[in-house]
Image: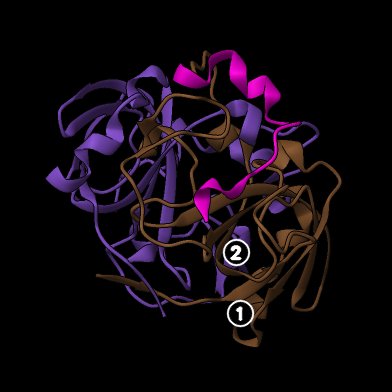
Chain colours: A purple, B brown
């Protein structure tokens, strides 16, 4: 068993899975607020120099998982690790968001695609040099990922 | 308290923190092997269509954390959330690696930058459309991130 602690809470306009954007690319301009618990505020120093940050959080709605899921962008069942489905063996979510401002324990962000009240576990700076890759293939997603900006969540991951 | 389970193990040539590349960009071509526990193998279906995958794992060496750390690429203390330091409030690691082949429960990967024996928590497909961002600023890292490929770990995060 691996144990973590909630270090803060992510606030967003989305109180329900239905109608929510399924990736930050579909949430451009949507404002969110990340509130870090007092014990961790000092760890935010220097973060404001980054234009984008990575939020790691717990998918707190829904429970359990299936090893095969039908993703939002597809009609065939796929292995859960080949998808971003929230109901997964360890329900860890990851979003890259735009950082707007940090004021004490509060981080204002843009392009947020997570549910209101989501428990925050970690924040990392987004560094393209570390993460971006050339010659990328995206398997079953193929052409479908161009639809990610307009696609919205439905009830399947409740 | 948030509880997760180990779903597999990451094997790499690095048995010690010292001399390890600090990001996949510094580990180009380094081979690793991700072994998923039998219960989760069915979740790997369709993953082989992706050229790159995201590994989420637990930094299992070292313990505790400081809210200010001196990163490998810098000489000033920075807020831990503005760094990728392994000793953090929740020691969750994230690496984008190249997928070479999947055979049953074993995923052969390239560009691995994690310690041998690292507990795996999640695998996600890497989709640039979801993650890559334009007009990125990287704060204190600034010009320093061009050194990431040659920089190596030392003993500071033991």
Q: Is the Cβ of the residue at disc 1 closer than 8 Å to that at disc 2?
A: yes
Instruction: Please state the extent of the stretch shown in magenta in the rendering.
Output: B139-158
Whether residue B150 appears in magenta in the rendering, the answer is yes
B3 sits left or right of B70 in the view: left
Q: Residue at x 15, y 28 (%)?
A: A104
Marks 1 and 2 on same chain: no
Residue B26 seen anywhere in this rendered image of the structure: yes
Residue A138 position, x and y percent, is 71, 45
Separation of residues labelled 1 and 2 (CA atoms) = 9 Å
| Element class at badge 2 | helix
Residue at mark 1: B40
Nearer to me, B2 or A15: B2
Q: Is residue A3 above or below residue B146?
A: below
**Residue A100 located left or right of residue A89:** left
Taking depth in this image into account, of B158 and B149 the one nearest to the observer is B158
Q: Which percent across, then down, holds residue A110?
A: 32, 26
Residue A81 numbered mark, or none = 2
Q: Secondary structure at mark 1?
A: helix
């Amino acid at each position: 068993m691996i144990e973590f602690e909630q270090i803060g809470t992510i606030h967003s306009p989305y109180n329900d899975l239905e109608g929510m954007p399924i990736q930050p690319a579909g949430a451009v301009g949507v404002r969110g607020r990340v509130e870090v618990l007092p014990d961790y505020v000092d760890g935010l120093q220097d973060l404001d120099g980054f234009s984008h940050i990575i939020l790691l959080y717990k998918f707190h709605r829904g429970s359990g998982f299936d090893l095969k899921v039908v993703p939002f962008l597809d009609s065939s069942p796929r292995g859960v690790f080949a998808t971003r489905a929230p109901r997964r063996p360890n329900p860890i979510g990851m979003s890259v968001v735009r950082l707007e401002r940090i004021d004490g324990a509060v981080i204002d962000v843009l392009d947020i695609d997570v549910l209101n009240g989501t428990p925050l576990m970690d924040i990392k700076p987004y560094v393209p040099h570390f993460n971006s890759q050339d010659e990328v293939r995206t398997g079953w997603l193929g052409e479908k990922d161009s639809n990610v900006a307009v696609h919205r969540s439905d009830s399947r991951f409740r």
